Image (spheres, helix red, strand yellow):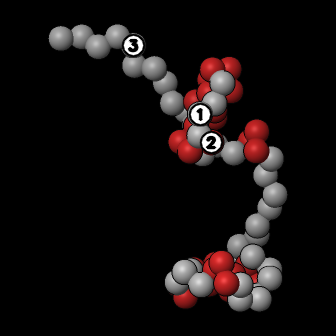
Amino acid sequence: MKNPVFHGRSKHIDTRFHFIRECVKGGQIIVEFMRMEEQRANPLTKTLPVAKLATMRHLLSVHDLGPLQD
């Protein structure tokens, strides 16, 4: 976020994504480090052990609807 150097790997990033960098620089957005264990999007992006998945489901407020009825 804070490094404005243009790298070859970031050539594909559209200029509209630099809006975030400007917001951080202007103090409108605060970017904070978050441990992997606290990332709520993890169950949406990777396979997790059953216990970790249950914890993440709770954090996301996802509930089991129970068995389907005809």
Left or right of 67: which side holds 8?
right
Mark found first going from the N terminus, 2 or 3? 2
- Could you tell me residue 9's position as x and y percent? 65, 78
Disc marking residue 47: 1
Q: Are marks 2 and 1 in contact (CB under 8 Å)?
A: no
Disc marking residue 23: none
Q: Is residue 36 above or below residue 18?
A: above
State the image quarter where residue 66 is shown: top left
Amino acid type, callout 3: Gly
Judge by depth and name the residue closer to the eye, 50 or 31: 50
Q: Are marks 2 and 3 in contact (CB under 8 Å)?
A: no
Q: Residues under labels 1 and 3: Cα distance?
A: 22 Å
- Residue at the spot of label 2: 42
> Which of labels 2 and 1 is toward the front?
1
- Residue at the spot of label 3: 66
Q: Residues under labels 2 and 3: Cα distance?
A: 23 Å
